[in-house]
Image: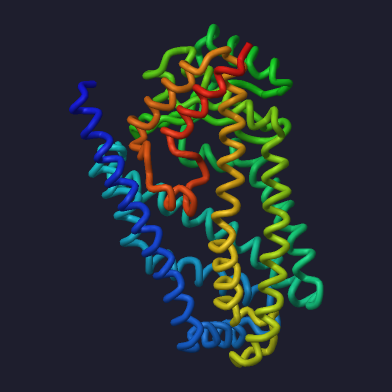
Amino acid sequence: MTPDDVSDRAQQAREYESLHNRLFVLRLLLTALALAVFLFSDGSAALVQGLASRFGAWWPLTNGVYVVVAVFGFAALTFPLSYYEEHALEHRYDLSRQSFGGWLFDYFKGLVLEMALALVFFEVLYALLRWAPDSWWLFATAFYVAFTIGLSAVAPVLIMPLFHKFEPLDNPELVARVTEFAQRAGLKVTGVFRWGLAEKTATANAALAGLGRTRRIILGDTLLSGYTTDEILAVLAHELGHQRHHDLTRLLVVGTTLAGLGFYTAHLVLAKLVHAAGFAGPADIGSFPILVFCLLTFSLLTMPLVNAYSRRREYAADAYAVATLGAAAPLTAALEKLATQNLDDRTPPAWIEFLLHSHPSIARRVAAARAAEKHVG
């Protein structure tokens, strides 16, 4: 790649980042507007009344159908935005290899999955609101933790294969080296798998997915085809660093604490507003827009704090990779390649990174990795 190509790619990355940030803000505004219209137009109350008249006193069915209708309705409202963000924009920057039909099929699979997960989550939440009106937020926090852990465990065997092909990696030498790396980190994995990304995207990725018996190393075929063995091992060493440092547990503790605070905040707000809004109480699912708005607002307000902590853990995982490999070069080379291939802005504005990024910028990560190399001995 010539210097001009690198410069053009960097400019594209800045444009791509800027467009995604604007779309993020637009989606938030559209979500807030949709919730407000749904609430203040009495659309939410009318939907509950219609469902209750059809299903009678069987509130779990009323609540379940309400959630499915609400999620589907919002998806329909934001479909043009999803199409532009996930398909049109990706093709504009040569990141997607999917046809419109292929993207649409994946979109509907994702929507069905989203409706199913929302159905389970809010059925439980509104059951807790009904059965434990004063302490529901405590039980909701415990359920959130169990729900999160359960999803993490089943994701690589039930969810991810819905969208990509996975097969055991047919490269005995690389499998042996990867397995050795995992064992040195004190980690047991069920296998090393080839992640079929190339048929849908030009981007590269790798991950350590699952928990317990479902934990596996997955390497994107787009990574396997364009990176040296040392660079692949550097990316893997970073992922193993998260495990070595118990980052999943750390982030789960942080997430649990914030979930508890978020649910408690929603508990206070619902107690103040639901009767004023004309609902029978917090367990009335007609007040769903108020609950969702509370949780969304709390999540946005705390996102910079969560992201700051996440960036610290990313630096620590990078340092582990440098120490494991004994040099920074494999990791920095992989990071530079990933930035170019995935169209990451190497130097985003500091305030954007502070507010929105869970990972440090590539430029900061490269500098930190080179600094960490000085302590390798």
Q: Position of residue 81 (x, y in %)?
A: 33, 60
Q: Which quarter shows the C terminus?
A: top right
> Is 273 left, or right, of 86 in this rendering?
right
Q: Is residue 95 above or below residue 337?
A: below
The residue under the point 33% across, 32% down is 202
Quadrant of res 57: bottom right
In the rendering, at what x and y percent does residue 74 appear?
A: 44, 68
Q: Where residue 354 appears, x then y in whole percent? A: 49, 50
Quarter of the image where one finds residue 239: top right
Is residue 206 among the parts visible in the rendering?
Answer: yes
- Along the viewing direction, whichever of 72 and 219 lies nearer the viewer: 219
Depth order, front residue of 221/30: 30
Residue at (32, 55) in percent of width and height: 83
Q: Is residue 313 left or right of residue 100?
A: right
Residue drawn at point x = 59 percent, y = 72 percent? 294
67 or 248, nearer to the observer: 248
Q: Is residue 152 left or right of residue 364?
A: right
Quadrant (top left/top right/bottom left/bottom right) for the N terminus = top left
> Does residue 199 appear in this view?
no
